[in-house]
Amino acid sequence: MRPLAGRAGGPLLSRSGWQMAPGERAALEGVLADVKPRLAIEIGTAQGGSLERIAAHSEEVHAFDFEAQVDPAAYPNVTFHHGDNHVLLPQLLGEFERAGRNVDFVLVDADHSSAGVRRDLEDLLRSGAVRETFILLHDTMNEGVSSGLEAVDLDAHPKVVFCDLGFVQLDPHARGLREIWGGLGLVICDEHGRLGITPERRDRDRSWRAALGVGLWRALAPARAARRRARERLGDALRRWRGRRF
Ligand SMILES: C[S@@+](CC[C@H](N)C(=O)[O-])C[C@H]1O[C@@H](n2cnc3c(N)ncnc32)[C@H](O)[C@@H]1O
């Protein structure tokens, strides 16, 4: 067997371009290998770490970012959509819906504000192009992200057959005012029950939260929330400014 160090340049352990921990990358790789998407969407590309793997496993990919920092020529099966995905994603989903197409896989990893991530998931679930779809959500361990996702009314979308916001959980490193990041959630839609997935909802059962107990970190939750709100207001202003440039 080759030592893992020998694979340092491989997709799971190389450091370049990724904003995910190795365990999260392995989960993404596993889901993609299982789903083998014909049509995939990535919301949030940055330096293309996750996009490289999504493109490798999918026939056709649509990637959203204000300004993806990758060379489009290296991704012949990817269409890049530059601008605010809150505007562009519903438009593209509408086109797919009118064409009767199904989106097989989505990675949600862009706007990490509570309202932003909630809107991303709601836009997806509302779409008639999201019928048999695996949706991976990054940074579900973040308090702001998880509160946004928990506000989504899954019962309004009977096609959601599986939801586990703690699908991948990292060591939380909870300390003071420090935010926790990382973690993957998985939502699966199966409108006609063809995927044969046993219905399961685990959105209120995340063991990492229970493990955090009642210490200082928990007591500082209101201070973190206030800081997050301030950052989100700044993010909104930045998005409006960036949106005007596209
Ligand atoms: C965490 S990074 C994505 C990392 C990437 N998925 C990976 O794992 O390699 C988030 C990206 O989302 C983009 N983003 C944030 N809000 C956005 C929005 N409303 N519309 C489009 N892109 C957005 C940012 O520009 C940033 O590049």
Image (cartoon, rainbow, N blue to C red):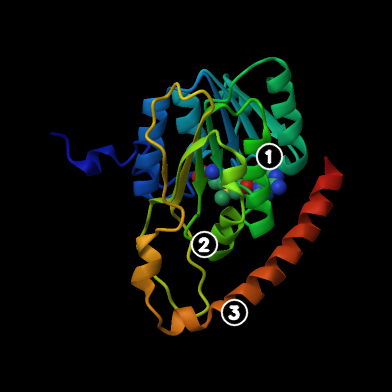
Please tell me whether residue 60 is drawn above or below residue 140 in the rendered image.
Answer: above
Who's the residue at 73% across and 18% down the image?
98
Taking depth in this image into account, of 74 and 198 the one nearest to the observer is 198
**Marks 3 and 1, how far apart in space?**
29 Å
Taking the image as drawn, is residue 210 in sight? yes
Element carrying mark 1:
helix
Q: Which three-letter amino acid code belongs to the residue tagged 2?
A: Asn
Sequence-earlier tag: 3 or 2: 2
Under mark 3, the amino acid is: Pro
**Are dots 3 and 1 in contact, CB under 8 Å?**
no
On the image, which quarter does residue 151 sit in?
bottom right
Name which residue type carries label 1.
Answer: Asp
Q: Quadrant of residue 148?
A: bottom right
Q: Nearer the viewer, mark 1 or mark 2?
A: 1
Q: Is residue 128 left or right of residue 200?
A: right
The residue furthest left is 1
Question: Which of the labelled discs sits on residue 123, or is there none?
Answer: 1
* Image position of 126 (left or right of 21): right
* Label annotation for residue 222: 3
Q: Secondary structure at mark 2?
A: loop
* Number of other residues with Cα within 10 Å of mark 3, as a class: few under 14, some 14 to 19, many 20 or more: few
| Location of mark 2 (residue) | 142
Residue 85, horizontal then vertical, whole percent = 71, 40
Q: Residue at x 69, y 22 (%)?
A: 97
Between the C-alphas of marks 3 and 2, the distance is: 14 Å
Q: Position of residue 94 (x, y in %)?
A: 74, 26
Name the element at disc 3.
Answer: helix
Q: Earlier in the sequence, mark 1 or mark 2?
A: 1
**Crowd class of label 1 (few under 14; some 14 to 19; many from 20; radius 10 Å):** some
Residue 172 in view, yes or no: no
Give the residue displayed 49% in from the left and 55% down from the top: 140
Q: Position of residue 219 (x, y in %)?
A: 49, 83
